[in-house]
Image (cartoon, rainbow, N blue to C red):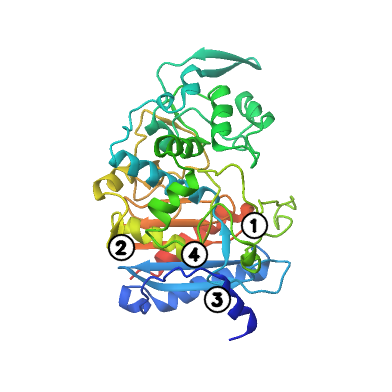
Amino acid sequence: MNAQTAARQTSAPQTPSLPHAKPEQLGLSPVRLQLLSDAFKREVDKGTLPGATVLVARRGQIGWFDAIGKQSPLAAAPMAKDSIFRIFSMTKPIVSIGIMMLIEDGHFLLSDAVAKFIPEFANQKVGVEHNGELELVPLKRQMTVQDLLRHTSGITYDHTGNGLVQRLYQQSRLRSRKITNAEHASLVASLPLMCQPGAEWNYSRSTDILGRIIEVVSGKSLSAFLAERILAPLQMAETAFHTAEANAGRLAEPFPTDPWTGDKVQLFNMLEKPGMESGGGGLVSTTMDYARFSQMLLNGGSLDGVRIVGRKTLELMASDHLGPEVKVDSPLMPPGHGFGLGFAVRTHAGIAPFPGSLGQFFWSGMAGTFFWIDPKEDLFAVFMMQGPGQRQYTRSLLRDLVYAAVE
């Protein structure tokens, strides 16, 4: 064991591993899994990404776990299985589970209005564009908790377009990591909605608002609630809104400029404790931590005898909640898919340009992290990298390669 490996082991809290087995014992081809790793090694050699980790588990055991390339393009350290990543929107499924736990506790209903918890949302208007002007019209109905979970709230993100409402987002302080969750929610409530609640699927800051609802209902900070109810029970010891200075040598970093566009890449500092604990994108984590969360989901809500959420509740979350009446026009929603309560859900065997199973559910992070749960194949995969511009390409590549290995 070299000094660097020893240092990594002593500075890291111990996240217990999941059981391992030989791929062939799990109905996975070891030859094809090696081809998976080889393909990502080629991408590293081409300069597509600095490095990555990939974990594939089936039937309750890990069949493949590899660390490829470098942890950071500016340092010599190889990518490691315990490297720490910004998981961005893979925070959303964790927070969505937290909301459903409070529903299971009987604190509120999915159909409850958001304004019941954050009164400023009662007076929101919808911004309708007419000839370059924004006309504010009243709500036809109140935004609900279900709307937040399935991104039909009418809230948006400042980076998903350049409409007049999104420009208002861009001009606000919403991107500041120094404001509190309460201040963030008030700011969002002060801005017009993109559309009437329930009318369209718009990827958005909705899950940040769910994080604030968790705080209001539980009386705890979002970080305290998640730690107590989800992260500690699942022994996800390295998932939080920042990490300690002692872990500075374990942080995965992107290229300073995008290898395809030349644009500057700037991600948040994982060592800095933020004021805002973003329920939509603030967590940092490790591959094994997220694998434990994924195994809990694949198990129907429990892991190692600890139940996090009920089986039927999770079944509801992993069902399509959009249907034909909700307009979907976004490159973030693959063809042949819908959206549940915190996850995208595969609704058609075909249509999408990549393999999968009906009922598969998943989500990903802006910097390139990705996971999916496939109940039909009793399989999940977790992929971690820090390369924002390559995330869509690597997601499709990973799906092709993992499913090619399923016997």
Residue 43: horizontal and vertical position, in percent?
A: 61, 67
Give the labeled residue for mark 4: 287
Q: Secondary structure at mark 4?
A: helix
Which residue type carries mark 3? Answer: Gln
Viewer-nearest of labels 4 and 2? 4
Q: Quadrant of the N terminus?
A: bottom right
Q: Quadrant of the C terminus?
A: bottom left
Which residue type carries mark 1? Answer: Leu
Q: Tell whether 151 sits left or right of 69.
A: left
Give the labeled residue for mark 3: 9
Which residue type carries mark 2? Answer: Asp
Residue contact at pointers 1 and 2, CB within 8 angstroms: no
> CA gap, disc 4 to disc 3?
15 Å
Residue contact at pointers 2 and 3, CB within 8 angstroms: no
Viewer-nearest of labels 2 and 3? 3
Q: Secondary structure at mark 1?
A: loop
Residue 341: horizontal and vertical position, in percent?
A: 37, 41
As displayed, is residue 45 above or below residue 280?
below
Which residue type carries mark 4? Answer: Thr
N-terminal-most mark, 1 or 4: 1
Q: Which mark is residue 378?
A: 2
Viewer-nearest of labels 4 and 3? 3
Give the labeled residue for mark 1: 271
In this view of the protein, which residue sits in the foreground, 38 or 60? 60
Residue 109: horizontal and vertical position, in percent?
A: 31, 32
